[in-house]
Every structure is written in structure tokens, then in C-alpha cells.
Image (spheres, grey):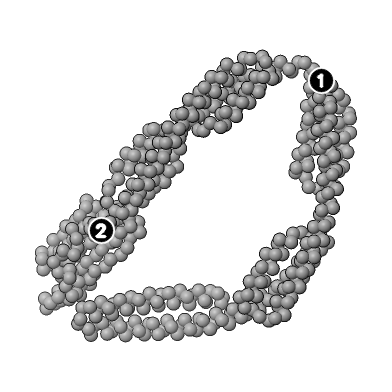
Amino acid sequence: MDWKTLQGYEEKYAKITVKPHKTFDGKVIEVLYGALDENGQPTLAVEGHEDGHGRWYGIESNGEYMMLVWQKPVSQGGDIEYGTEFRENAVEELEKDVRHKQELCRRVEMFHAGTSAEEIEAVKKEWEAIQNWKTAKEVEYKAWFDESLEKLEIRREKAVENAGIKEALVQKAEELKNSTTWKETQEAFHQLQDQWQETGHAGEKENTLWEAFKEARKEFNKKRKEYFANLDSIRAEVKIKKEELIKSVQEAMEKNANYNALSSKMDEWMNDWKALGSAGREWDDQLWEAFNGARQKFFAERKEFFKKRNEEFSTSLAKKKALIEQAKEIVATGNLDKENTEKMKNLDVAWKDTGYSGRKDNDRIWEEFKAVKEQFWEAKHQANQQRFQEVLAHKEELAESLRKEINQLQEDVFQVDDYEEVHEMERQIARKKSMLDQTKVDIEDLKNKLN
């Protein structure tokens, strides 16, 4: 029922409270009406007072009203009705249900193609078991829930298609695993692997199919390795050790930027290489090209590194000296305005962009720059403290003025009989209280800044 149909709600002293409620995207409404004073005359209803007032309590969402609690005035019998089985706890139950639906929406969004049909069906039943309060937020969540399920179904259908493709790849792998044409079959497995990676997720069958494919490939590789293992075990061992040396050089170049330390290591690896001997005619040239190529690359990079580093140090130092001069010019103006403040901040950003200036100069030049900056920021700090003191004094005067105005309005309201004028004065009191609260927050913030 609509609270506006209540007999007596529109009386002069009815108290109507409307509060927005974000959880279900609607409003909570409370109407206190029908209060009588000790002489049996209508009076302003006050919550908690024994003035015989009635109370209508409910919600509005999507233009629809729902009564939750309705206690009639004592003059009308004082009977109480409940709009739901949850009685006084209806709003709490509504909030819980709406949040539950939101959680289910998020859960469904996280579902993937491999999510089981049982889990999907369970979440649908969980949704259906939640009471529908017919609020705007529930309508929104229902659309979200349905859309997520539709997208999930599309992904599951695609997963079925992918599973068919991967089943065919597994079948081909099974056919290839016993082949003894090693080179061609190895290439064929590489192609199957590429096709597998290009194919999307296969849903619930993904792991099972992958294990079958991997097992077939593993069996082929095992047989291939066993075949070649006995051809030339000694040369194979030399080849492995030389490959390890190549890997050591390559990894060291990737991880170690200390060219001085790495130079002595290069000499050590070269001696190890000579001591190993031959890995066989088919591998020797290829292995040497890889090893020596990595060494020559290192020597070239080392030369270029030190040349470039020294140039960067010089460039960085020159840029930092220029920034210090700019900072000194700003400080010399004595101007602490927004423009100069922004310039000082930008100098810090520019300083970071100049990079490292070398062990000899980096710390020294930074201390010089920092000393100039501190002159500006200390002056800025002192100026801000003075400004905060002035603003604080103004805010405290404003707060005192608002308190007096509120007290006066609260006294005046009891002298007024006109209903509309009473409500207007109450609105003024509310506005000024809001202003006072914000002013108190501002005062506290200013005090924190001053401390």
C-alpha cells in the first residue's frame, strides 16, 4: 500500500522521513502521525514518546511501495500489521538478499568453460531460492546474472567444439608415437603442438586430453633418445659440456652487467673449451660458432658499454648542473606562488630523468641540489602555516555563528503555528547543522595540518 493513502498522514503534525537506500536503489520511508497531546489535541509526533502516534514504515523502489510495518494510532485502535514474514527485520533481510544476489552475479562472472554443469545448476537454484523484493537493484542484478549465464553458455559451446579438435590431435599423436622416422616425426609433433596452442580451451575435457597428448609425445621422445644414445656416448658427452659452456656464456651476459668480473670468467671458459676436445665433425663447427660468437659479442658489448656509460655520466652531470641553476633562480625570486611551486616539482621529475652521474659525482651533485630545494620548501612551509592559521580562525568564527543561528531557530520553531513555516524552519536547521558539521571537519583538518 502507498503511505500517502493513510488517514491523517497529511495532518499538520505528521512527521515524514524519507531516506535513500543505495543497497536496493530505493528509499526507506517512515511516517509518524495521529499523535495527541494530554488534552486530546493533535500534536507533533515524536518517536519514542507515548503520544499515541501511529507509524507506517516501508520502502519505495521502481515507483512501487511496500509496507513493512504499520501500527495504527491509539485513537484508531493501535493495531499493528506486518507486510512480510520478517516483521521488524524486513529491511535487514532485504539488504541481505540483495547483497546475496550481487555475490552470485560476481560468482557467475568468474565461471569459465571448464565449470561443471552441476555447479552452474546449483548457482541457478541458489538464485531462485532468494526472495524477490522487486526492487530496482534486483532488476539490475537479474539482468547481470542472466547476461553472465548467456556468455558462459557461449564459452561452453565453444569449448565443446575445441574438445573435438583436440581429440583429433590426440588421435594423430597416438598414430605418430611409434614412428621411427625421427626427424620428420619430430617436426610433425611440433606442428601438432602449434595447432593445440592455437585451439582454445576444451572445458572439462581439457586436462584429460592434454595428458593423453603429452603422454604420446613423451613416448616418442623417449624412443628417439634411446636410439641416438648409443651412437657415440663420448662425443655426446663432449657436446653436452660444450653446450653447457655456451649456455653459461649466454646466461652470464644476460644476467651479469659487471663486465670487469665477467672478463676473467671468459678466459676461464676458453681454457675449459680447449680441454674438452672434439664433439664430432657434424657438431664442432656449429658449436664453435655459437661459443666464439657469444664471446665476440661480449667483447663488443663491453667496449660499447663503457664508452656509452661514460658519455651518459657526462650528459647526466651537465643536466643536473643546469637544474641546480634553475632552482637557484626560482629561490632568488622569493616568489612562492603556484607557478614557482610547480616549477620546483617539475625540477624533481626532471632530475630523476637525468639518470646516474657516476660514483664520483652522483651523491655530491644530489646534496647540492637538495640544499637549494630545501630553501624553497622551508619558506613554502612557513607561508602555508601562516595561511592555515588565518583560515582556521575564520572557520572557528563561522562555526560559532552557525551554532548561534541554530539555537535561535530551535527556539523560534516552538513559537510558530503554521505547518509549512515549521517545516521550512526545520529544513533551515538541518542545512545549518550540515554546514556546521562540515565546518567542524574543516577545522579538525586544519589543526592536523598545523600539527
Which residue was labeled with disc 1? 234
How far across and down, in percent of the image, does residue 151 sit? 41, 40
**Neighbours of disc 2 within 10 Å: few (<14), some (14-19), many (20+):** few
Residues 11 and 292: in front is 292
How far across and down, in percent of the image, does residue 343 sit? 66, 71
Q: CA distance from mark 1 to mark 2?
A: 88 Å
Sequence-first disc among 1 and 2: 2
Question: Is 441 left, or right, of 334 in this rendering?
Answer: left
**For residue 232, which quarter of the picture?**
top right
**Neighbours of disc 1 within 10 Å: few (<14), some (14-19), many (20+):** few
Question: Is 293 left, or right, of 372 in this rendering?
Answer: right
As helix, strand or loop, the secondary structure at mark 1 comes to: helix
Residues 264 and 20: in front is 20
Residue 63: assigned label = 2
- Residue at (81%, 63%) from the top-left corner? 361
Question: Is 250 left, or right, of 81 in this rendering?
Answer: right
How far across and down, in percent of the image, does residue 158 sit? 45, 32
As helix, strand or loop, the secondary structure at mark 2 comes to: loop
**For residue 230, which quarter of the picture?**
top right
Question: Above or below — where is 396 with respect to 136?
Answer: below
The residue under label 2 is which amino acid type? Gly
- Residue at (78%, 42%) from the top-left corner? 253
If the image is split into quadrants, where does the C terminus sit? bottom right
The residue under label 1 is which amino acid type? Ile
Question: Above or below — where is 167 with respect to 5?
Answer: above
- Residue at (70%, 74%) from the top-left corner? 374
Question: Is 47 left, or right, of 233 in this rendering?
Answer: left
Decide if residue 208 is in sight here. Answer: no
**For residue 336, which quarter of the picture?**
bottom right
